[in-house]
Each structure stands twice: as C-alpha cells, then as structure tokens.
Amino acid sequence: MIPTYFPFSIMYPGTAGRFRSCWRMMRIYLPTEEVRSLVTAVPGAEGFLEIFAPADGDSLTVEEAYRTCMQWKEATLGADVSFTKVLEHGTAPFFDENTISYLRSDILGHVSLQKAKREELLLSCRVFLRLALDHDMRQIEVAEGLGRIGSMEKRLFESIRGTDEDNAGFPGYSPDSRAFAKPQDLGAQMARERLGAWSAVAAADPLPSGLLVTDSSEVMNLLLEVFPGLKQVAKIEYIPDYTRVEDRGALVGWQEDFSSFMERLVSGKSGPDDGPAPPIPADIADSNGPVLSVFLLPGVDIVGFLEMFAPALSINGASIDNIETGNLLIGHLSG
C-alpha cells in the first residue's frame, strides 16, 4: 500500500526522512507537472515520492494564472488597502468584503478561461495549490536557512569551548535545539481551504489510496472536528531518520509487517481489536524520534473523504466504481 501525503505538494526534508522509514514510497499530488523538478529537488524526495499531476492539458493555464497572481502581488506590494477598493469605470470594486470572488475572477480572466463550471472550479483549486506550493517552498527555505545558521553556531561554540559536555553550562548553547530549526506547520494557514483544493486534485486520480498521511497538527485537528468518528488504532514511537538507519534489512522487515497491518484495516479484513501494530525494532529506533499516530475512519472510504471537502467535483470526472472501497486510514506524524 502506497500512502498519500496531504494536503500539501511538498514536504520538509526532515519529514521525508521520517516517512521513508515507514514506507518505501509515498504518493504526492502536484497542481501541475511543471513543478515536478521543484518538488523532487528537496533532499530525500527523489526516489521516494511518486508524483501525480492531472493530465488534462490545463497545466500551462494553471501556471499562467499563477504568474498573473504573482504579478498582481508584486504590483500592489506596499499599497494601502484602499487601493483595492476603488471603483473604476462603474465596475465592481476590485476588493470588497462582500465580493471577494471578484479578485479571483479578475485574475483568471487574464488567461481567457472558457470552461464549464466544474472545470473552472478544478482549475481554481489547482491555481490555489500552485500558490500554496510557492508559499510552502519559501517556508522550507527559511527553515533550511535557520538550520544552517544553527549548525554554524553549534560548530562555533564547539570550536571555542570544546565538546558538548564542556559547553553544558555555557550560556546560550543548547546542542539539541540548535542542530536544526523547528519547521513551521504548513497547515497553520488556511487548513480547510487546502483540504478542499487538494481533494479536488486528488479526485482526478483514478486510483486514490485509502491511506492518507500528514505532518500537520492543524490539519489533524480539523479532521477530528469534521469526522468525530475517527478512532486512533496505532501509535508508532521512535521513528528514525532513514538516512541514519544502519540495519536496512530490519527496517524493510518492519515496513512489510506495518504495511500488512494497515492493509487489513483499510480492507476491513481485521479491526483495531485484532492486535496492535508492530513496533519499530529497538535496534533501529530513535529515542528522540517522532510519533506516527494512525486513525481509522470506519464506514468512510477515500471517495467519501474527498466528497466531504470537494462536493462539487465528482471523483475522476464521474466515479470510481472499480475501486475496492473500505475504511480510510489517516496517519499523523508529530513530535
């Protein structure tokens, strides 16, 4: 079973390293094929992420709309908000609390969209994901930059004061906290909108997975509100960084057992009371590693999940009757 990372189109390098210890491959949805190289350039992504982007011929339109949005942003950077409320030639205000859709219509109008309502909605969702990807890439760059600064500071303290033991009482020095910058939760902004746009793109996948995974606490909290029936069925502690695992054979063996455990839950062939998930082998576990909590949503499959957040878009343009339905599993990496 290949899990799908959601509701983002890019992940932090550290996240990729932890997820790769759980699965050999992970699926990720992109707004356009044109951004593939940007996403796979993140350390740990190449050879691990299986890319899916809608192949409907609208990628260039999405990219053009994205560039138009960025041009509008640059053109209005620093302008007073009243600038966007000015009436021009009797048209609707460029921005108004009651007509915020005007901005989207104005931008998309520059790319001469002649689409049916469903196609236009999907296109809008893909443009949103493209803009979100741009935002998330910047957050990753900031985290990497802070991490490099932290590492340089750590080496500087070590060169001045000696070993970590010698530095223990030195003011301002903490080797554990300065090795890497703690990344921001990418879902902290517009979590529900991200889920809606992501679900619209996921609906274009003819074979969506019944296992979704995220590293966003905000997204997970939102899902717990939307789906009160979510039940935690597994808690895997001490997940190591794949790049630091020496015994790859032991890791592969555990991955196979863990995958079989989840496949049985998704198919309904076993329930959460039929036995616990296999723990990480002690010889490869990371005592400071994060926790993967797995939640079961009984009676709701991936189709029902996507329709909850993108109700105006039918799955794959029609339906996916050929997909074996069952339960839905959601994994949350935290800590």
Image (cartoon, rainbow, N blue to C red):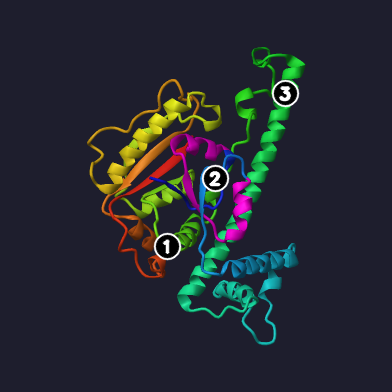
Q: In terms of sequence position, does the residue under pointer 2 or pointer 1 come before the other?
A: 2
Q: Secondary structure at mark 2?
A: loop
**Is residue 225 visible in the rendered structure shown here?**
yes
Residue 169 x %, y %? 66, 15
Q: In terms of sequence position, does the residue under pointer 3 or pointer 1 come before the other?
A: 3
221 to 24, vertically: above or below: below
Q: Which residue is mark 1?
A: 203
Query: Quarter of the image holding residue 316?
Result: bottom left
Label 2 packing within 10 angstroms: few (<14), some (14-19), many (20+):
some
**Is residue 80 visible in the rendered structure shown here?**
no
Is the residue under label 1 in contact with that under label 2 (CB below 8 Å)? no
Residue name at image x 54 percent, y 64 percent: 126
Q: Which residue is mark 3?
A: 155
Q: Amino acid at mark 2?
A: Asp
Residue name at image x 63 percent, y 32 percent: 180
29 to 109, vertically: above or below: above
Give whichever of 218, 232 is nearer the camera.
Answer: 232
Residue name at image x 66 percent, y 39 percent: 144
Mark 3 against mark 1, which lies toward the viewer? 1
Q: Which mark is residue 98?
A: none
The span from disc 2 to disc 1 (Cα, nearest Å) is 25 Å
Q: Is 107 one of the magenta-colored residues?
A: no
Region of the chain picked out in magenta, as a range: 14-41
Q: Secondary structure at mark 1?
A: loop
330 relative to 143 in the view: left or right: left
